[in-house]
Image (spheres, rainbow, N blue to C red):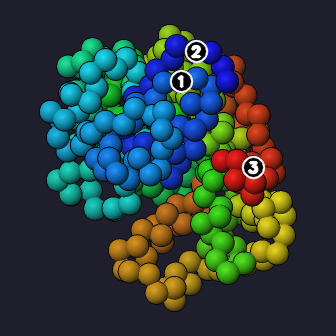
């Protein structure tokens, strides 16, 4: 374990991607405070040495209490609703409340995760923009306008999600995913977060979080399952197949929008600045697949 005096308060700490990031940060000696709505759930998911406190992004007063003593905040929120007219989004109005509470407590840095499409909208080669990212962008504007130094980490597609595509030994790929993506993982993200904490060179900066290899989704899936579970077969389905999967209508609409977006997402390698300042990726696709298989992630 590294010896460090770094501290980090995390909002959204019980999310699927946030939990492994927290484990990596703890291994490097970071003192982590998790601000959560459900204390019991957090105690089940997070290690004992995480300081778990109550805070609800809908209640700015609870955040003001939760952020006491906080210098650095990392926001890892997510939404799956496509309706921009909702009166409250965690990643929009919730972030505004986080900013207000951070200003109240004299926080020195706010970090937030985003999708790489928000950093480079031209990667969406057919002009389809992810609606959830557009909502997140509005929350990020609150952070930028606050005057608090920010660090935005705009991420490519996470290999961590690949096991979710596997059902009954079938890895189902939805849509015509032919363009290259520079797949990342939570090990890479955790390293970047660690090196950004309290780093003046990361203040008021945006960074791309990418792996070192670009490849189409089917190729990445093939390389992943070869390590993770060679008995898994891979099959591609058209977007129309979503209607046959029996999902609730709202979930089906979200998945159709998401995969329509990914079909036309064509990344380029743009992470050199990140590697120089926040560290290069150390774990590629196969190594990460092995770590998932061995329950090391």
**Residue 82 location, x and y as percent?**
34, 62
The front one of 209 and 175 is: 209
**Residue 96 location, x and y as percent?**
24, 35
Q: Are marks 2 and 1 in contact (CB under 8 Å)?
A: yes
Residue at coordinates 72% horizontally, 78% vertically from top-left?
169
Q: Is residue 75 above or below residue 235?
A: above
The front one of 262 and 224 is: 224
Q: Residues within 10 Å of mark 1 (few under 14, many from 20)?
A: many
Mark number, residue 291: 3
**Residue 215 location, x and y as percent?**
76, 53
Which residue position is annotated with label 1?
Answer: 30
User: How far apart in space, not on screen, are marks 3 and 2 (Cα)?
Assistant: 25 Å
Q: Is residue 87 above or below residue 281?
A: below
The reply to whether residue 151 is in sight is: no
Q: Is residue 269 above or below residue 274?
A: below
The front one of 280 and 55 is: 55
């Amino acid at each position: 374990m590294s010896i460090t005096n770094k501290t980090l308060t995390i909002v959204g700490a019980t999310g699927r991607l946030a939990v492994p990031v927290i484990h990596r940060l703890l291994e490097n000696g970071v003192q982590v405070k998790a601000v959560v709505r459900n204390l019991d759930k957090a105690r089940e998911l997070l290690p004992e040495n995480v300081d778990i406190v109550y805070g609800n992004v809908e209640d700015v007063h609870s955040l003001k209490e939760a952020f006491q003593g906080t210098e650095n905040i990392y926001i890892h929120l997510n939404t799956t609703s496509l309706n921009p007219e909702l009166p409250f989004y965690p990643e929009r109005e919730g972030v505004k409340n986080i900013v207000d509470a951070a200003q109240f407590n004299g926080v020195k840095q706010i970090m937030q995760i985003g999708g790489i499409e928000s950093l480079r909208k031209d990667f969406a080669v057919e002009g389809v923009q992810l609606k959830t990212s557009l909502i997140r962008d509005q929350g990020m504007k609150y952070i930028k306008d606050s005057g608090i130094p920010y660090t935005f980490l705009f991420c490519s597609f996470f290999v961590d999600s690949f096991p979710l595509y596997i059902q009954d030994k079938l890895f189902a790929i939805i849509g015509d995913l032919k363009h290259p993506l520079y797949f990342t993982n939570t090990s890479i993200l955790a390293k970047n977060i660690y090196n950004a904490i309290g780093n003046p060179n990361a203040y008021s900066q945006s960074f791309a979080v990418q792996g070192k290899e670009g490849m189409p989704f089917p190729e990445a899936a093939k390389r992943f399952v070869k390590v993770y579970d060679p008995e898994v077969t891979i099959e591609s389905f058209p977007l129309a197949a979503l209607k046959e999967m029996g999902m609730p209508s709202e979930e089906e609409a979200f998945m159709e929008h998401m995969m329509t977006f990914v079909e036309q997402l064509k990344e380029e390698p743009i992470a050199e600045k990140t590697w120089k300042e926040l560290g290069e990726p150390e774990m590629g696709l196969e190594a990460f697949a092995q770590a998932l298989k061995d329950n090391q992630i």
